[in-house]
Image: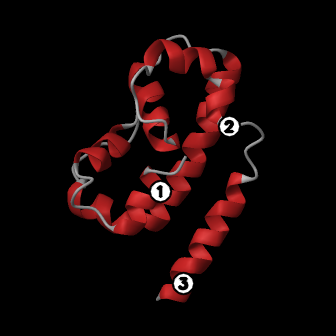
Amino acid sequence: MKLYTLILIIFFNLSLFAETKPIYEVCQNEIATYCQGIKPTKARILQCLKERGKNLSDVCEAGQSALSDTMKSKSQGFCKDDVSEHCRWIIPGGGRILKCLFENESKISNQCKVVLNEI
């Protein structure tokens, strides 16, 4: 089981290299406007922008979309059981699944917490 987890972590970390610029860079103005005081993890910034972000720049919208796809892949791998247990009634979209996972952070698996707290 540990080997499987290690392989998944390596696989998903490799996918991070596919992101050309980090969300913090491409959405700097939007983060400053909408996400002041938010813990600067990728998942929390993504959830904030999805929930509060209005009129995002094209480059930020593209960065958010790319990060959203990456986070979706990771959460389906590492957080699938947590989503099934704690967020099964949540309709996906607009950052609602991430918000649910954050609300249940004390109850979710360590693997899922790693995804949620990745910088």
Q: Residue at x 42, y 67 (%)?
A: 111
Tell me the residue at 23%/45% (across/down).
103
Taking the spot 38% from the left edge, 58% from the top edge, the residue there is: 113
Q: Is residue 77 above or below residue 27?
A: below
Residue 95 place in picture, x, y as percent: 40, 36
Residue 35 vs residue 108: left or right?
A: right
Check disc 3 and report the residue beneath it: 4
Image spot of residue 3 (x, y percent):
55, 87
**C-alpha distance separating marks 1 and 2:** 16 Å
Instruction: Give, as a three-letter code, the residue at label 3.
Output: Tyr
Q: Which mark is residue 115?
A: 1
Give the color scheme: rainbow, by chain, secondary structure or one colour: secondary structure
The residue that label 2 is drawn on is 22
**So how many labels did they put on this image?**
3
Q: Quadrant for residue 99, please give it.
A: top left
Query: Which SS class for mark 1?
Result: helix
C-alpha separation, residue under disc 2 versus residue under disc 3: 27 Å
Residue 98 at x, y = what percent? 37, 44
Q: Position of residue 89 (x, y in %)?
A: 21, 50
Mark 3 surroundings: few (<14), some (14-19) or many (≥20) residues within 10 A: few
